Image (cartoon, helix red, strand yellow):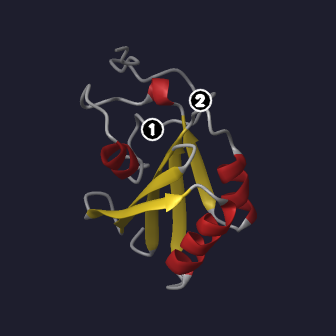
Amino acid sequence: MNNTIFVGLDLHNAVISVAIAEGARGGEVRCFGPIPNRADHVGELVERLSSSGRRLLFCYEAGPCGYSLHRQLTALGHECIVVAPSLRAWPHLCRQERMDAALPPLVDDASLRPPGSANCPAGLRPLRA
C-alpha cells in the first residue's frame, strides 16, 4: 500500500476538488485544490500524479455528473471507485467540498461501497437531511 496514492475527488459541473493521501491508511491527507472539470485538465492531473511511477487509486461520489470521469480514468489505466453516497457513513451533517474530497481516499473503509454493492453493514444506515 505504501506505493499507492489515493486520490479523492468531489465533482461539480465546473470544478473538481482534489485531495491526496499517500501510503497506508491513517497517513496525511492533503488538499491538492480544485481543477476545472474538463478532460484535458483531468489528464494533466493524472500525468502529474503518475510521474512518480506510483499506483493511483481514484475515488469519488456518484452524482449527477455521471460516469465520464470514471471511464476516462480507467481508460488511462488507473483504478477508479465510484461510491454510492447513500451507503457512505457520514461523520457529520455539515458537508463541504474539501471534506468530501478528503474522505474518499480512505477506500478500505467498510462504509465506502460502490453503487450496487451488498446492503449496508449492520448499524450503518443512509443519513437523510
Q: Amino acid at mark 2?
A: Ser
Residue 39, quarter of picture:
bottom right
The percent position of residue 108, horizontal first and vertical second, equals: 42, 48
Residue 31, quarter of picture:
bottom left
The percent position of residue 106, horizontal first and vertical second, equals: 37, 51
- Total marks drawn? 2
**Residue 117: mark:** 2
**Residue 105 located left or right of residue 73:** left
Q: Residue at x 52, y 20 (%)?
A: 119
The percent position of residue 64, horizontal first and vertical second, equals: 61, 32
Quarter placement of the C terminus: top left
Q: Residue at x 40, y 54 (%)?
A: 105
Q: Residues within 10 Å of mark 1 (few under 14, many from 20)?
A: many
Q: Check the image and report above or below for 9 versus 50.
A: above
Q: Check the image and report above or below for 80 versus 120.
A: below
Q: Residue at x 57, y 33 (%)?
A: 63
Q: Residues within 10 Å of mark 2 (few under 14, many from 20)?
A: few
Mark 2 element type: loop
Q: Residue at x 49, y 85 (%)?
A: 52
Q: Name the residue that disc number 1 marks.
A: 112
Q: Amino acid at mark 1?
A: Leu
Disc 2 to disc 1, C-alpha distance: 10 Å
The percent position of residue 104, horizontal first and vertical second, equals: 41, 47
Which of 37 and 46 lies nearest the eye of the viewer? 37
**Residue 60 located left or right of residue 109:** right
Mark 1 element type: loop
**Of the image marks 2 and 1, the number of the one nearer the N terminus:** 1
Residue 121, quarter of picture:
top left
